[in-house]
Image: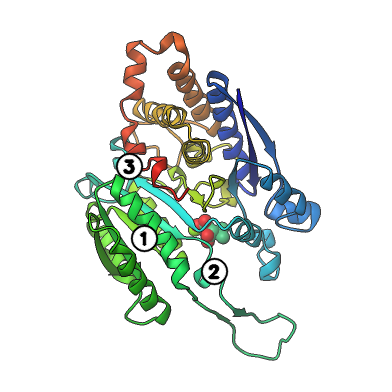
Amino acid sequence: MSRFRIVLLPGDGIGPEVIAAAHRVLETVAGAADFDLELVEAAIGGNAIDTVGDPLPPATLRLCEESDAMLLGAVGGPQWSSLPAADRPEAGLLRLRKHFELFANLRPVTVLPELAAAAPLKPELLRDVDLLFVRELTGGIYFGPRREQGDGDDAFDNAFDTMVYSVAEVERVAHVAFQAARRRSGKVTSVDKANVLASMRLWRRTVDQVAEQYPDVTLQHILVDNCAMQLVREPAAFDVLLTPNLFGDVLSDEASVLAGSLGTLPSASLGDGSRGLYEPVHGSAPDIAGAGIANPLGAILSAALLLRYSLDREAEARSIESAVAAALAAGYRTADLAGVDDVAVSTDELTELIIHHVAAITSPASQSSQDTAKLRYNTEHFARGVGHEETTR
Ligand code: IPM
Ligand code: MG
């Protein structure tokens, strides 16, 4: 039986709660599958600063190097916000992404019919919304040269960050976007600020060159300010959105509103190999940490992406996605999503329900039952065109 090692990185705030939920779901899936999962926990972010003085301790990095995949909760919180940049919880996450050169961050945004009412936009605008952000993750302004007050010389009265992109960096992430588009509706929208920034003119030129290898895919360029507007004006017009690091960070939070809540969105960060880092798009939400009400769907659906991309286990990924859809179809939601007609449940209750559905879907006894057929009905909403072939491995 094959055995995979997964490092769980709970992190800060609601991170431990949502990772505990995903952990239980993964164990349920593995219990019924023909593979073993070894799930090990490691420290990252603020809690790692508090315990060992480093947001990405060497022991954590070693475990990650020996793993098949990593599943992270969230990092950060107000208690660490006055630390110098390199010592902050976020620095641990950025170093982890960079260490494994996870340059392509996939953030699917689908609007489940059950959740359309939870979004503040008019329901007719949300029909057929199915986006995939392909965000460049290890370059750009996040990693360019910078100078910060307090970096040894306090005399200067300015600070700067630099947006740098090389042709090679743009090419490799553009290929991921075009390959993804081939499996979806064949359309890439590349987001830049080419009217103002030199790095973004290189971005646009390079994407144009890569596009020549994909004559079957339609490419459109859009300026980031216009994109921010169009995403809420006519979101269904987009399919794959290829973005530089910073713009993808901003626009994917904006787009999460379409899906009802930031809490539901998963992400996958991939490089050249199969090892990936999976994390919900949401942050550490310190205001609700420990209250037992955090939405575990982003983490649970990230675990599904992990099974799909790093372990090549499509069937098990779908069983999780079906189970989530079934729980939502039955009206169960955490507080961030619950409307008047819904049942507002705790993190644990929703997780329990999903586990119940996963067990029903994966148990051989129920494979042929009608219930199972019903549970499977909605999985296309999650899985369409994000098959593993589109990744870079
Ligand atoms: C995200 C987060 C991170 C980012 C932070 C926590 C460093 O906002 O993954 O979207 O900016 O990339
Ligand atoms: Mg973000």
Q: Which of these two is toward me, 64 or 55?
A: 64
**Above-or-below relation of 32 to 151:** above
Quadrant location of residue 66? top right
Q: Which one is in front in this view, the residue at disc 3 or the one at disc 2?
A: 3
**Above-or-below relation of 326 to 232:** above
**Above-or-below relation of 201 to 98:** below
Ligand 1 within 8 angstroms of badge 3 C-beta: no
Q: CA distance from mark 2 to mark 1?
A: 17 Å
Ligand 1 within 8 angstroms of badge 2 C-beta: yes
Are the residues flagged by discs 2 and 1 in contact, CB closer than 8 Å?
no
The structure residue drawn at horizontal position 39% and vertical position 51%, both measured from the top left corner, is: 256
Q: Which of these two is toward me, 181 or 303?
A: 181
Q: Which of these two is toward me, 208 or 88?
A: 208
**Kind of residue indicated by mark 1:** Leu
The structure residue drawn at horizontal position 35% and vertical position 75%, both measured from the top left corner, is: 193
Pinpoint residue 103: horizontal percent, then vertical percent: 50, 58
User: Which residue extends farthest left?
Assistant: 124
Q: CA distance from mark 3 to mark 2?
A: 29 Å
Q: Which of these two is toward me, 104 or 267?
A: 104
Q: Which mark is residue 385?
A: 3
Q: CA distance from mark 1 to mark 3?
A: 16 Å
Q: Which residue is mark 2?
A: 142
Would residue 234 be found to the left or right of residue 362 on screen? left
Give the secondary structure at mark 1.
strand
Ligand 1 within 8 angstroms of badge 1 C-beta: no
The structure residue drawn at horizontal position 54% and vertical position 48%, both measured from the top left corner, is: 273
Q: Which mark is residue 242?
A: 1
Pinpoint residue 74: horizontal percent, then vertical percent: 59, 50
The structure residue drawn at horizontal position 59% and vertical position 46%, both measured from the top left corner, is: 72
Q: Which one is in front in this view, the residue at disc 2 or the one at disc 1?
A: 1
